[in-house]
Amino acid sequence: MPRLRALDPEQAPSGARALLADIIDRHGDAGPMVRTMAHSPALLQGYLQLSRAMKRSSVPRPLSEKISLAVQEWIGCALCLAAHTAAGRAAGLTDTDIELARQATATDAREAALLTHAVRVLTEPASITDADIADLRRHGWSDRAIADVVGLVALNQLTGSFNLVAGLEPAQEAATSSS
């Protein structure tokens, strides 16, 4: 059950009102997470900016979805897992790819190294060493991709944590989207 209620643009604080109205105008709906984030204009603006920026990540979309699945599995956000499972399928991931990603691994050693790194960025960033970064480079990952992983993890931390605090679950998304 939601702990925070989703807002319509006219209910949102002035700083979030225009952002929310723009999203609804462009997409027809803003979804329960964004509509609930509208309680905090600063949070909503930050989320939207980070989300747009990470779409320009050097990490290929299918791998980006695998990273999201690995991180959200750790965080425990069912809404995010459902969303990234659907997005992963749309990006061409198989059921096996999705299951392995949720375990922070992949059949490809290069991808598995980056997925393991992403979970470490989330869970124990202070433990990452020069040798760990060198290992990622040996797997062919550029400094840009390594940096982009931090952004992808941060975005997933934000959305997963917000959804858990707000009490948003997949059932609410389906019910809210259809109403």
Image (tube, helix red, strand yellow):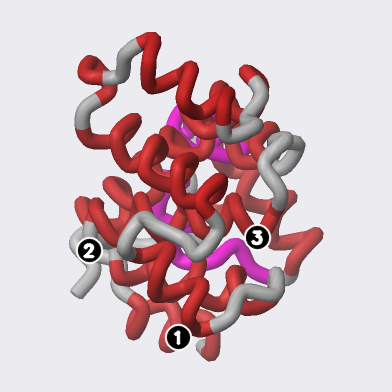
Q: Quadrant of residue 113?
A: top left
Q: Quadrant of residue 73?
A: bottom left
Residue 133 in the image, given as x and y percentages of width and height: 45, 19
User: Against 51, is 105 above or below?
Assistant: below
Q: Can I make out residue 4 in this image?
A: no
Quadrant of the frame with the N terminus: bottom left
Q: Can I make out residue 105 in this image?
A: yes
Q: Residue at x 36, y 43 (%)?
A: 116
Local secondary structure at mark 1? helix
Q: Is residue 74 left or right of residue 12?
A: left
Residue receiving disc 2? 167
The amino acid marked with disc number 2 is: Gly
Magenta residue check for 114: no
Residue receiving disc 3? 62
Gap in Å between the C-alphas at discs 3 and 2? 28 Å
Q: Please provide the residue range marked out in magenta.
A: 29-48
Asked whether the beta carbons under mark 2 and mark 1 sit within 8 Å of each other, the answer is no
Q: Mark 3 or mark 1, which has the lower sequence index? A: 3
Q: Residues within 10 Å of mark 2 (few under 14, many from 20)?
A: some
Q: Mark 2 or mark 1, which has the lower sequence index? A: 2
